[in-house]
Image (spheres, rainbow, N blue to C red):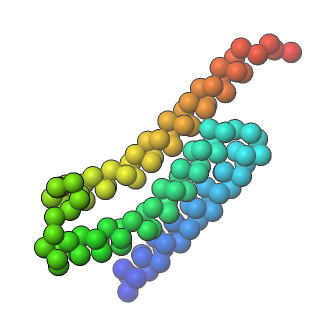
Amino acid sequence: MIGYIIGIAGIMISILMIILFVIGLWNSKIHSFNAGVYFFLLLIIHEIYSFVAPPLIQDYVDKLIAENKKPMMGMTIGELVASLSLIPKMILLLAFICLIYGLRRLWKLKSTSPEK
């Protein structure tokens, strides 16, 4: 019973995060902050990937085991899972690089503009 409630709470939190990311994306677009748009877009992609990828990866690994096949590029199943687990981390890294770059550009523009 507790596990069921925790699962539902996790899904609700993920949906709330996607809604907040869409709001952030919209606000960044309104204020013409392109780095913020890319940041929130990548966070939305990351959140959707978190929903979609685990069952697909599990089905692929189960199929490899059932058919006694080797994964692509001659990797072991452990190497395949480890390499696929890097994808969400790379998406987050790229998102924060975009945000930091955009904030740095914005800060440089504000620091070099003449004050009134």
Residue 60: x percent and y percent? 28, 71
Above or below residue 95? Residue 19 is below
Above or below residue 42? Residue 2 is below
Q: Nearer the viewer, residue 105 or 65?
A: 65
Residue 20: x percent and y percent? 63, 58
Determine the residue located farthest toward the bottom in the rendered image.
1
Taking the spot 16% from the left edge, 64% from the top edge, the residue there is 70
Taking the spot 56% from the left edge, 37% from the top edge, the residue there is 99
Quarter of the image for residue 21 reads: bottom right
Instruction: Give the side of residue 114 with respect to residue 44, left or right.
Output: right
Q: Quadrant of the C terminus?
A: top right
Total labels drawn: 0
Residue 85: x percent and y percent? 31, 55
Above or below residue 37? Residue 69 is below
Q: Nearer the viewer, residue 63 or 58?
A: 63
Instruction: Give the side of residue 41 with respect to residue 86, left or right.
Output: right
Q: Nearer the viewer, residue 69 or 96?
A: 69
Quarter of the image for residue 114 reads: top right
Instruction: Give the side of residue 103 with respect to residue 26, left or right.
Output: left
Q: Quadrant of the N terminus?
A: bottom left
Taking the spot 73% from the left edge, 46% from the top edge, the residue there is 29
Instruction: Give the side of residue 32 with respect to residue 80, left or right.
Output: right
Q: Nearer the viewer, residue 69 or 17?
A: 69
Taking the spot 49% from the left edge, 72% from the top edge, the residue there is 11
